Amino acid sequence: MTAWLLHAMDVYDKHGLHSAIAVLTDVASFAQAQQTAGLTLEEVERVLTTFITGLSGRPLKLESAETIYTDTETLFLPMRLNCFAQREDHFRLYKAMAVHLWAQTRFGTWQRSLNQVLSRFPQPEKACQMFHLLERIRLDACLARELPGMYREMTHLLETVGETRWPVGWEAIIEQLSRPTATVQQSYELLSKVYARELPTPLCYQGILWPDRVAEVMALRLAREKELFRIALAQLTHEHHEKLTPERCHSEETLPRVTTQKVPDEFQPNGFTFELNLDGQPIVPPANMKSVMASIIQD
């Protein structure tokens, strides 16, 4: 009873009254869950958050939900897993879900408007699921290169549940999407070719794509970060202008000019980043400006 009340109070603190009432009402499910080897997100949230924070890219939050998906700022995972005999397997599944969602945000799944593409197909929902399969193949290949240890854990997880990572008959497509140079553009180009095929069963960590939620969150973020970048840029040029002598400071010819230059960067998923130049000279932006730039480039 103590665990039930504490859990209800914690849910209230994090998600509000409605969610807490649902916990208090469904006593039987909570009691049954306490007697199994299941695992709750609450139990592993701190470890998972630390793990995801250690990965590159935009900081991401964790929240519980009935569906596994991301809106590009939050990873939504099940409140509880109870499908294995061992708690370690439940933790491995939580990690696999979180890493797959992180990979979507890091390796460019959402760099184009998915809704616009899906509207061209007779069955947009099927097209969305097929696109997710293509992206899952590409993202798994990215994880094999970037996080080989985690990729091995995910392989072990699939063996435990008896799922096959690669669909039979998709060898040529898998080869294309597994290349280091493959981007989301390849998935879009292949979508029309595979749309008529039978849709393979999604893997246990795959979840769903929710393009409507992503479009809403991204629109707000792009507007916010555009303004933050503009303010940081103005502050940077102002500080540079103040360093000039009084005579030069009042001359329009000495007003600092900021330009950007695209430069190769093998450590970035897209293979490039941007360099800021102030009056033709490369400059290192301050930390707050650098994080905004990184997020903009990621989108």
Image: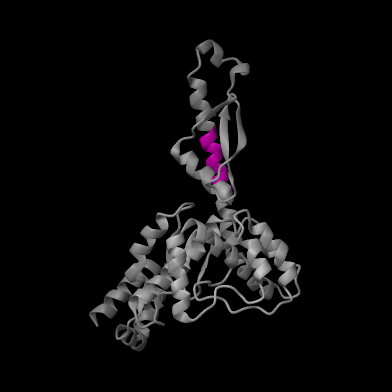
- Work out whether residue 134 or residue 213 is closer to the camera in this orientation and state it: 134
Residue 72 in view in this figure: no
- Work out whether residue 299 or residue 250 is closer to the camera in this orientation and state it: 299
Q: Residue furthest left?
A: 2
Residue 130 point in image, percent of width and height: 65, 72
In the rendered view, tell whether residue 47 sits above or below residue 56: below
The residue shown at (48%, 52%) is 58
In the rendered view, tell whether residue 279 sits above or below residue 231: above
The residue shown at (44%, 55%) is 55
Question: Which span of residues is magenta-colored?
Answer: 223-233
Task: Reply yes or no: does residue 228 show up in magenta.
Answer: yes
In this rendering, the count of numbered labels is: 0
In the rendered view, tell whether residue 205 sits above or below residue 279: below
Q: Quadrant of residue 170?
A: bottom right
Residue 145 point in image, percent of width and height: 51, 57
* Majority secondary structure in the magenta region: helix
Residue 15 point in image, percent of width and height: 40, 69
Horizontal side, residue 149 vs residue 202: left or right: left
Q: Quadrant of residue 140?
A: bottom right
The residue shown at (57%, 54%) is 220
In which quadrant will I find the N terminus? bottom left
Q: Residue furthest top?
A: 247
The residue shown at (68%, 67%) is 172
Residue 166 in view in this figure: yes
Task: Reply yes or no: does residue 201 show up in magenta.
Answer: no
Residue 121 point in image, percent of width and height: 75, 71
Query: Which color scheme does this rendered protein use?
Result: one colour
- Work out whether residue 5 or residue 89 is closer to the camera in this orientation and state it: 89
Horizontal side, residue 194 vs residue 3: left or right: right
